[in-house]
Amino acid sequence: MFGDNEKKGKEKDIMKLTQINDEKVKKEFLDKGYKLPEYDREAMRKATVSEPTWVHFGTGNIFRAFPAAVIDGLLNEGLYNKGVIAVDGFDFDVINKAYKPFDDLSLLVTLKSDGNIEKKVVGSVAESLAADFSVEANVNRLKEIFTAPSLQMVSFTITEKGYSLNGPDGSLAGVVKDDFDNKCFPPKHLMGKMAYFLNERFKAGAKPITMASMDNCSHNGDKLKNAILAYADKWVEQGLVDKAFYEYLTDESKVTFPLSMIDKITPRPDANVVEMLKKDGFEDTDIIVTDKHTYTAAFVNAEETQYLVVEDKFPNGRPPFDKGGVYFTDRETVDKVEKMKVCTCLNPLHTALAVFGCMLSYDFIWKEMKDEDLAGFVKGMGYKEGMPVVINPGIIKPETFIDEVLNKRLVNPFMPDTPQRIACDTSQKIPIRFGETLKAYISKGTDVSTLHYIPVVLAGYLRYLTGINDEGESFELSPDPLLAELTGIMEEYRDGKKAEAADLKAILSRKDIFAVDLYEAGLAEKVTELFNEMNSGKGMVRKVLHRTVLG
């Protein structure tokens, strides 16, 4: 019996990320179909630490599953010899609990729509740090990195909120106000920290650098630039930095802030993936939830499809991402790709599925795509109302992109993505995902009240804000910076009360939510009528969807 337990104990220890250099463990991984780093990881680390070229802020799933994995592939092919330094500027526990214990390795589990699963250990993270200014060693190391002449790029996946210096009411966020009022130098906000480290680079010779946002938000590079410049401008005013530092930041031969468009679905760690990995004997499957409610793990589950299109403005050079499938192009093309994806071919479809999926009590997007009403609705909206005004970027065909979204990506039964996750921050998404299409139709002289699908989504959003599902039961709304304000307005309609168009002016007139004033656009009346119908009883959301699909 003891011998059996001892044997089981040895087997239990065998498939851990930190043991992949052990020949026995390596064979176990390979025999079970896992791909492992084929390069000398210690040599990569040494080269990266001594002469860093790329540091990335934001240590979440999208970073590990996409840009870090691209560089890992280039390392495996012998096309590059350096990795990335990963830094978390918000939730330091991610570094302490999901990076350091696993030697900065992660397992990428790619869930393909044909049912195949690819498991690859990504080893391209050479070093991980927390941007914690209370730890002197971390600050000193970041200063070393930012002043290194070899550094080419600082990139970010910190979500759109990470660049904002203002609260929901438009005034300075508390931490930013504190930074400004108390002349905090170094500051507390991450954007201030970036300005601080760039000032170190400026003082060390004003070497060129690219600051590249890879976040899924419109004109991400401009958001990053404006936030950093706000700090630099304030510091010049307060006499904390030389005016020449601000001039350095605005000199595009020295510092650039390219636009980018990123597209890859990387949901939270999934319990089904955990079970699959456990059956393999893989041990590092604990789902980690930090005190700041970050969900992470030693593995990332992600879809196969991925796009990254970046404005090619790198005054100090860049890692060879293009050899790993990343597109580098001009600013206008990046803008067109973003508009194609965000305004037509993916994001509006996602938001429609999120809003209606929550009200129809779905737990996964792929299940929604088996619902004839929901699938028919997003297909009609995409092909019939989106494609006529789509922006064609040239490098990616809109028809190919939307076909892939509808027939391969959203229907993937192995992707554990939820309408509740996608419904987060919907008030911030609608102006781009639907408002831009409305503006395109208006500019063509089209009466937008004749549109068939988009008014239903906007009415569905109002219905969603009541917090009552299609069965008449309360459900939990997803986080949103305007949630308290908007649900406060819609509270009186929870019991099915009928609204007049004028009653909803506090929402429907807001250009920050819809990009246009729906009254001025001639759409408020129709949206109100559709809302009233959906809100008139059980099953009415379904009824409106069904009728819309039938045409």
Image (cartoon, rainbow, N blue to C red):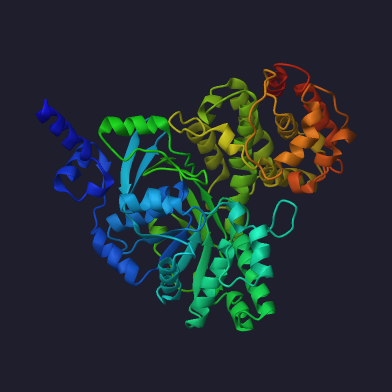
Q: In the image, 347: left or right of 155?
A: right
Which residue lies at the image location 41% right of the left edge and 31% below the top edge? 271
Q: In the image, 515: left or right of 136?
A: right
The quarter of the picture where the N terminus appears is top left
Q: Position of residue 164 (x, y in %)?
A: 64, 57
Residue extending furthest toward the left: 3
- Up/down of 128 relative to 433, above or below: below
Which residue lies at the image location 59% right of the left edge and 46% below the top edge? 341
- Quadrant in which residue 243 is drawn: bottom right
Residue 450: in sight, yes or no?
Answer: no
Q: Position of residue 8 (x, y in %)?
A: 17, 31
Q: Position of residue 303 (x, y in %)?
A: 44, 39
Which residue lies at the image location 11% right of the left edge and 29% below the top edge? 2
Which residue lies at the image location 26% right of the left edge and 43% below the top edge? 16
Task: Tell which of 190 and 302 is nearer to you.
Answer: 190
- Up/down of 108 relative to 463, above or below: below
Task: Tell which of 184 and 223 is nearer to you.
Answer: 184
Marker count (numbered): 0
The quarter of the picture where the C terminus appears is top right
Q: Position of residue 63 (x, y in %)?
A: 45, 52
Task: Tell which of 42 and 110 is nearer to you.
Answer: 42
Residue 361: in sight, yes or no?
Answer: yes
- Up/down of 178 relative to 366, above or below: below
Task: Tell which of 547 and 105 is nearer to you.
Answer: 105
